[in-house]
Image: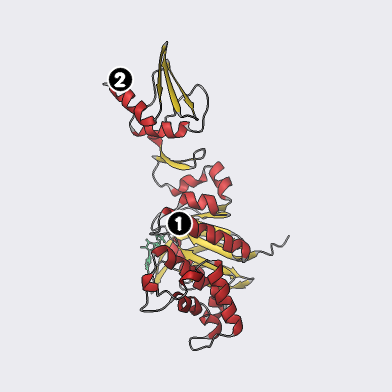
Amino acid sequence: MVNKDLILTAADLTLGYQKGRTSKNIAENISFHLERGKLTCLLGPNGVGKSTLIKTILCQLPPITGKIILNGKEIKEYGIKEISQKIAVVLTEKIRTGTLTVRQLVELGRIPHTGWLGKLSENDEMKVRKAIEATNIQYLVDTPLSELSDGQLQKAMISRALAQDGEILILDEPTAHLDLVNRFEIMHLLRKISKEENKAVLVTTHDLEIAIETADEFWLMQCGLPLITGLPEDLIIRQQLDILLPTENLKFNKISGKVQALHESKELEMEESNPLTQWLTLALRKRNLLPFQKDIRIKIKEEPFIIEWKNGDNFRHFFSIESFLIFLKTNKE
Ligand SMILES: Nc1ncnc2c1ncn2[C@@H]1O[C@H](COP(=O)(O)OP(=O)(O)OP(=O)(O)O)[C@@H](O)[C@H]1O
């Protein structure tokens, strides 16, 4: 069956940098499918080659071996203008040019269609307006870029890329330097754009937890390994996120959804299971207070929050984890 949403594919690419006759290979066995309507997150440790892969997709760097196919045609057969009409990019460098306003920045997104001196047609104006609405930055249109916060600037950059109206939107670390709320907002915005505008959105990120929350597809890169692709939830269950953790001391805990040090894997034995146990376990692990002696029993109640500690006939109740820690510490000494 033909997948109509498939837009960009590659099989067995070798990525790297060529200087004269010598080539420096950065990554091998890179195969992928990028689809419309999906948010795809590219994850991997620093220096593994994520930006190199993006540059290769954008034709700024030829692959050492292999081909990238865009809409059924090898990407190097497209002209630069055609590529910029099809692929919009938001890179990590910040633009804070002079007195350029947000609206003027978004209008720059139309250059691949109008040329540098081109006047905006009604259709161009409509695309600019739609891009501003999609990113919810109407209130910022007349603000100079120099007066924006990092989160607002990132939304303006995404708006410019949307105005470009390519079928593919690529963003290199769009959440770097942003606070937690803005990181969530930007990733949810990108997810919404992929669905509502039916675009293929490819994002490089180090924000594993937010990527798990928002992505339809993961591409995992690790030195010397082929690119691993798939549904984030399947990769979690198969324990494949561990390839992002180059040291053997770290493991992805597929139950809590968090990265954990192996020596910290001791669990708290409870009389009854309770989801809040994970926070008590974390507090105890951090202070090396696990495991307990065999005859000690622990129970947690949620509303009101109570920890019950039982040693034989001896009972104690605590109303916060902190008071429980103080008790354990004093009893230890
Ligand atoms: N122009 C270049 N010439 C030669 N080697 C380069 C060049 N640019 C990057 N590299 C090397 O390619 C490797 C991959 O770099 P790249 O920037 O693609 O990694 P990355 O995964 O994007 O890292 P990060 O998460 O830190 O952004 C690094 O070893 C880097 O030194």
Q: Quadrant of residue 306?
A: top left
Residue on which the image places disc 2: 331
Amino acid carrying label 1: it is Arg
Which amino acid lies under the numbered mark 2 shown in the image of this protein?
Asn
Nearer-the-camera pick, 102 or 269? 102
- At 49% across and 89% down in the image, what residue appears? 117
Task: Name the colouring of the figure.
Answer: secondary structure
What residue appears at the point 56 percent right and 42 percent down from the top-left corner?
A: 237
Which quarter is ligand 1 in? bottom left
Q: Could you say where residue 301 lies in the image, as x and y percent from the top left?
A: 49, 27
Q: Which residue is mark 1?
A: 183
Q: Is residue 153 above or below residue 259?
A: below
Q: Between 84 and 296, which is closer to the camera in this rendering? A: 296
Vertical side of 201 occupied by 88: above or below: below
Which badge, 2 or 1, is on the more N-terminal residue? 1
Dot 1 lies on which element? helix
Task: Classify 10 Å Cα crowding around label 2: few (below 14), some (14-19), many (20 and above).
Answer: few
How crowded pointer 1 is (Cα within 10 Å; few <14, some 14-19, many 20+) is rated as some
Q: Secondary structure at mark 2?
A: helix
Which of the image's four quarters has the C terminus? Answer: top left
